[in-house]
Every structure is written in C-alpha cells, then in structure tokens.
C-alpha cells in the first residue's frame, strides 16, 4: 500500500477522492470489507473505473487517503490549542469530540482487522506535526497516539456510556479579567461564575437576511428555539476571535479563514448563567454543514420574519437583534 503523507496533501481533486472515500464508508456499513469490490466503490461514488484508477490502485489506498483527510482536518484544532502544551486537557477533549464525528469509519476499520492502518496514520500525524511543534520525543508522541486511539475505539464500541471529559471555562470578573476556571456544569447553574462566549451573525450576501439555527430539543437552555447561527463558549485560554472561528467551523462547516468582522461586546445575565459575549459578523450564503447533534435546522430569515416571529426566538437572540438595529448594522 502507498503511504499517504499528510504534509504532501493538496486540495486538488479532493471532491472526487472524498466521494470515493464516503462510498467506502457507506459500503462498509452494508457488507464486510473483504467483499467490497472496486466496481462497487466506483458505482457507489458515481465515478467510472477509469476515474477510480486515476487516483487509486487498491481499496487500502482509498482508506489511507480518506483517513489522512480526516486527520489533516484535525491539524487546525491542535494548531489553535491555546495551552501551548502537549498533551493537554484540550488536546484530549478535542480529539474525542472531533473523531466522534467519524466513529463509524474508525470502528469499521478496527472491526475489519485494519487497526494497523489507523495507528500508522495517527503515528504519521504525530511525527509530522506534534513532534516538531512541541519538541517532545517520538516515543512520547507514539504513546499518546496509541492511548487516545485505543481509548476512543473502546469508548465507541461500548456505546459511549461515559461522558466525554467536561469542558473547562475561564472565569472572569465584570471587567473581563480572568480570575479562575470552572467546569461547564458549574457555570450553567451558578450566575456568579461569569464566563465567555463568541457569537457569529451570518448575513446573506443580499444584505436582507440573517441565518439562524434551531436549537435541538435536548439543549439544557432554550431547547427548540431559534438562536444566533453560531455560538459557543471560549475554551480555557482561548480568545474571542479564535473561538468564533472554531465554532463557525464546528457548527456550520465554514472555513476558519473566512473574513470576520468584530461588531460589539455584550453581557448575558439571567438566573442560570452569566456570559460576556463577543459578537462577530460574517457574510456567507453557504453551503452549511451543521452539527445535527446540536442543531435541528439552519435557515435565513428576512427582516419581516425577524420582526414577526420573535416569540420563537431565544431572549438572547432578541437582545442581539435589537443591538444590531440600534447600532445600525442591520
């Protein structure tokens, strides 16, 4: 099998290659890996056999390419880890959260007897990214790679009965100065613990519509309500803009490098929590790939809808819309 190097990746022909990779993932849910033929892959991906062989020679090369695309997408998360240490709490938390989106693929590989493919790709990521960045030994990197991979696979196979490690937030005073840390569960329920969030208001290019997200009915706060398109807490040590870029990528699948404009700071104070919010603006018509575990739907709302359907919105969104209009942004 050819070894695909993350460091040599380009975006050239990525769409076709990823269609073939997604076809492999889909077929592995339908039949055992050994029974999947090249023709099956081509048909499922909607490409000709000639196109398939333009990129790959074997099924293993398809898996290697797709796996490296997944891991290369995680590079940004490590590169933006604010702690500056490895391994850190954020490293481990982000790894479990990120790779959970591809659980079927990872568990499928392990069950197909291709665990070595997983560990080889993870080790290569460590060699090319973690070791030079943090100056740690290869064996420390390999140790962490094996530990997190094995923990992740077993956690998925056992039905994710245990909750992922709880997020840690910086606690700030009324002036925004960091004065300590606290877990998410304490922040949601104790209004004295002021923490920070970043919001991104997504404007349609026509300037007449704003994108909103419909919160799932399983949310702790304001379930089933329409809310700002992008919103999330700052991780420990993170700044507002970094959090905004991370959240718009995680929640809507948008490129972190898209231009963001800072609009204003606001404060949320209620009986459940206290948040200092950094509000940013982004212009985009999509496409949007939203987190279905967090969001039921995303939709552009016209000015008229925004005024007429306020009863369906979270109080925080209503306040944010009022502030937008007050400042002349919309």
Image (cartoon, rainbow, N blue to C red):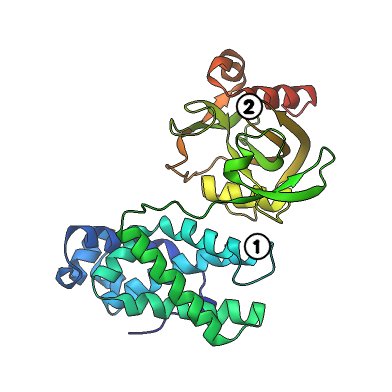
Q: CA distance from mark 2 to mark 1?
A: 28 Å
Residue at the location (55% across, 31% down)? 212
Q: Looking at this rendering, what residue extends furthest in the left direction?
A: 35
Q: Quadrant of the C terminus?
A: top right
**Circle number at residue 218:** none
Give the camera-side residue of 25 and 134: 134
Q: Is residue 179 above or below residue 126?
A: above
Task: Answer with mark 2 or mark 1, whichever residue precedes in sequence.
Answer: 1
Give the camera-side residue of 26 and 189: 189
Give the camera-side residue of 231 and 288: 231
Instruction: Please rate how many residues cluster around mark 2, counting C-alpha atoms within 10 Å: few if below 14, some from 14 to 19, many from 20.
Output: some
Residue at the location (27% across, 72% down)? 50
Q: Position of residue 247 (x, y in %)?
A: 59, 48
Q: Position of residue 326 (x, y in %)?
A: 78, 22
Q: Position of residue 223 (x, y in %)?
A: 49, 28
Q: Position of residue 157 (x, y in %)?
A: 30, 60
Q: Which element is circle 2 on?
A: helix
Instruction: Please rate how many residues cluster around mark 1, counting C-alpha atoms within 10 Å: few if below 14, some from 14 to 19, many from 20.
Output: few
Q: Does the image show residue 313?
A: yes
From the image, tell me which residue sits under label 2: 317
Quarter occupied by residue 32: bottom left
Q: Quadrant of the N terminus?
A: bottom left
Residue at the location (50% across, 75% down)? 144
From the image, tell me which residue sits under label 1: 80
Q: Is residue 272 above or below residue 183?
A: above
Quarter occupied by residue 313: top right
Q: Does the image show residue 21?
A: no
């Amino acid at each position: 099998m050819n070894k695909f190097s993350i460091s040599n990746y380009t975006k050239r022909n990525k769409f076709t290659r990823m269609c073939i990779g997604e076809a492999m993932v889909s077929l592995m849910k339908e039949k055992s890996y050994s029974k999947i033929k090249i023709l099956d892959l081509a048909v499922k991906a909607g490409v000709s056999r000639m196109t398939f062989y333009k990129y790959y020679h074997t099924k293993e090369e398809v898996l290697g390419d797709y796996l490296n695309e997944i891991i290369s997408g995680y590079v940004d998360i490590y590169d933006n880890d604010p702690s500056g240490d490895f391994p850190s709490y954020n490293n481990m938390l982000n790894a479990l959260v990120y790779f959970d989106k591809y659980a079927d693929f990872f568990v499928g590989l392990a069950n197909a007897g291709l665990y070595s493919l997983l560990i080889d790709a993870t080790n290569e990521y460590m060699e090319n990214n973690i070791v030079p960045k943090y100056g740690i030994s290869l064996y420390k990197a390999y140790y962490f790679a094996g530990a997190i991979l094995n923990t992740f696979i077993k956690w998925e196979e056992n039905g994710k009965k245990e909750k992922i490690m709880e997020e840690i937030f910086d606690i700030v005073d009324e002036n925004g100065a960091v004065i300590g840390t606290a877990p998410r569960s304490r922040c949601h329920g104790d209004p004295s613990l002021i923490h920070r969030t970043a919001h991104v208001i997504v404007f349609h290019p026509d300037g007449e519509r704003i994108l909103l997200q419909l919160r799932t009915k399983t949310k702790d706060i304001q379930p089933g309500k329409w809310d700002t398109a992008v919103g999330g807490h700052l991780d420990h040590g993170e700044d507002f803009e970094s959090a905004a870029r991370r959240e718009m990528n995680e929640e809507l699948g948008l490129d972190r490098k898209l231009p963001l404009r800072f609009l204003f700071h606001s404060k949320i104070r209620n009986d459940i929590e206290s948040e200092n919010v950094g509000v940013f603006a982004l212009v985009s018509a999509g496409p949007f790939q939203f987190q279905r575990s967090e969001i039921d739907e995303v939709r552009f709302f016209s000015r008229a809808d925004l005024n007429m359907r306020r009863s369906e919105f979270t109080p925080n969104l209503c306040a944010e819309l009022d502030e937008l209009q007050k400042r002349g942004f919309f």
